[in-house]
Amino acid sequence: MKKLTITGKSVEEVLAIFEEEMKINKNEYEYLVIDKGSSGFFGFLARDAVVEITIKKEFYERKLEEFLKNIVSYFDSDIKVSVFSKNPRLFIARIDGEGIGKIIGKHGKGLGALQHIATIFLNRLSDIKITVIIDAGDYREKRKELIKKIVENAVEKITSGVERVELDPMFSFERRLVHEFLKKFPHVHSYSEGVEPYRYVVIERRRNHDNIQTRKSRTYNNR
């Protein structure tokens, strides 16, 4: 995670100032003393202490949880928030409660907006790119099943003769699901067009696949 090199009159002073300024707990960072520093001789040849501090994922988990709790409290004070990280670049937040429908919003737009600002918030605290994924109840799992059906219907249209199908605008994680589901259909290919938040997936018949199938058919018929 994020590393900082800080100097001060002593190691103790460096750590005390760092904890105060960052509002960070002792278990949320590690440090390595590069130079203990020296008061010198009667003030001469004094040398500052140098400490390298690494901020751990626990700090980011807590900050994200506090950030989300503050926002969702405006919708329903009983909504529960839990955060964990799968790796230093991916943080998962889950919100549960009776009022999550207000947060999800129509077609998940509210949830998408919350995820977007949460990602911006956490990236401002880090020096590496972090992705935040927020799930509300079982919304994402239900949405995944719906997207799978949307993909299957689109592929069916193309198989029936339609050359191109444009899906409705989707969030980035939903578009990734579409591309993933389409991998098992070799006769189509997909790509995204448009600008956020109106970016959408285009599914088209794969031309070279038709040519391959034609050549295979001709080869078979000539045998």
Image (tube, rainbow, N blue to C red):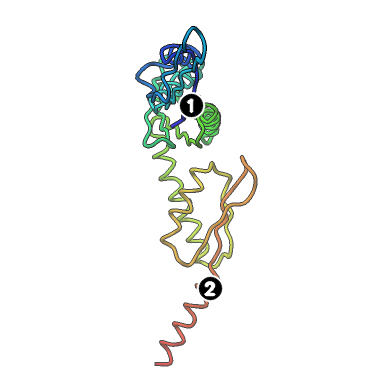
Q: Which residue is drawn at 48% across and 54% down?
A: 179
Mark 2 vs mark 1, CA separation in Å? 53 Å
Residue 26's place in the image compared with 222, above or below, is above
Residue under label 2:
208
- Snapshot quadrant of residue 53: top left
**Residue type, mark 1 in image:** Leu
Q: Residue at x 48, y 67 (%)?
A: 187
Furthest residue toward right: 195
Residue 209's place in the image compared with 195, above or below, is below
Q: Is mark 1 on a helix, strand or loop?
A: strand
Q: Which residue is drawn at 65% across and 44% down?
A: 195
Q: In this view, does 132 lie to the left or right of 204?
A: left
Badge 1, how many Cα within 10 Å: few under 14, some, many 20+? few
Which percent across, then down, holds residue 107? 53, 36
Which percent across, then down, holds residue 212? 48, 77
Which of labels 2 and 1 is toward the front? 1
Report the front residue among 129 and 162.
129
Q: Which of marks 2 and 1 is nearer the N terminus?
A: 1
- Snapshot quadrant of residue 136: top left
Residue 108's place in the image compared with 207, above or below, is above
Report the front residue among 196 and 124.
124
Q: In this view, does 83 lie to the left or right of 126?
A: left
Kindly identify which numbered label has been placed on residue 4.
Answer: 1
Report the front residue among 98 and 117.
117
**Residue type, mark 2 in image:** Asn
Which percent across, then down, holds residue 134? 45, 32
